[in-house]
């Protein structure tokens, strides 16, 4: 089964597939802080069990809440930059997990 992020969810996730998915996520984050929510939204499942916990502490459950949360976030920033620091990662046949620190330089539009 191919997910929205573009890699296979059933079976083993190859390291190059994980790297490509992370790259898409980071590029989507860079667009989000410029006010474009669409690349970020494209990465999320449309299933009812999708959950987003934003850096602001907002918990969104279900596609409608997740989409609205991403759209609100994108409307609050402009002229921004984002960088990532990888602090941990695990890749097994059943699980791919990374931990990154996101650093934003942001102008917050209220």
Image: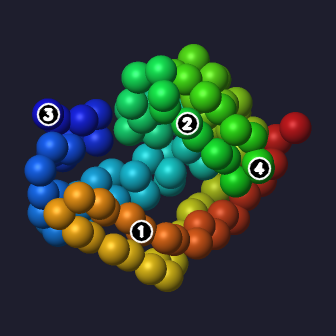
Residue at 40% over, 52% down: 25
Can you give x and y, in whole percent of width and height, for residue 81 in the image?
Answer: 59, 62
Q: Earlier in the sequence, mark 1 or mark 3?
A: 3
Q: Earlier in the sequence, mark 4 or mark 2?
A: 2
Image quadrant where one finds the N terminus: top left
Numbered badge on residue 1: 3
Please name the residue that numbered disc 2 is placed on. Answer: 51
- Tell me the distance, in whole angstroms, between the alpha carbons under discs 4 and 1: 20 Å
Element class at badge 2: strand
**Alpha-carbon neighbours of circle 1 within 10 Å: few (<14), some, or many (≥20)?**
few
The quarter holding residue 65 reads top right
Please name the residue that numbered disc 4 is placed on. Answer: 56
- 30 on left or right of 69: left
- 98 on left or right of 30: left
Q: Nearer the viewer, mark 3 or mark 4?
A: 3
- Tell me the distance, in whole angstroms, between the alpha carbons under discs 3 and 4: 32 Å
Q: Are marks 1 and 2 in contact (CB under 8 Å)?
A: no
Q: Earlier in the sequence, mark 1 or mark 2?
A: 2
Residue at 39% over, 30% down: 45
Can you give x and y, in whole percent of width and height, for residue 101 in the image?
Answer: 58, 72
**Alpha-carbon neighbours of circle 2 within 10 Å: few (<14), some, or many (≥20)?**
some
- Tell me the distance, in whole angstroms, between the alpha carbons under discs 1 and 3: 22 Å
Q: Residue furthest right?
A: 110
Can you give x and y, in whole percent of width and height, for residue 75 in the image?
Answer: 70, 33
- Tell me the distance, in whole angstroms, between the alpha carbons under discs 4 and 2: 14 Å
Please name the residue that numbered disc 1 is placed on. Answer: 98
Q: Residue furthest top?
A: 64
Q: Earlier in the sequence, mark 3 or mark 4?
A: 3
Element class at badge 3: loop
């Amino acid at each position: 089964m191919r997910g929205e992020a573009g890699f296979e969810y059933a079976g083993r996730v190859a390291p190059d597939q994980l790297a490509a998915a992370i790259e898409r996520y980071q590029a989507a984050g860079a667009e989000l802080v410029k006010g474009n929510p669409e690349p970020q939204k494209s990465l999320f499942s449309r299933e009812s069990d999708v959950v987003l916990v934003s850096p602001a502490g907002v918990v969104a459950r279900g596609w409608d809440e997740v989409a609205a949360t991403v759209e609100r976030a994108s409307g609050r920033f402009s002229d921004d930059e984002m960088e990532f620091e990888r602090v941990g990662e695990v890749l097994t046949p059943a699980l791919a997990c990374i931990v990154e620190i996101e650093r934003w330089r942001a102008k917050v539009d209220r």
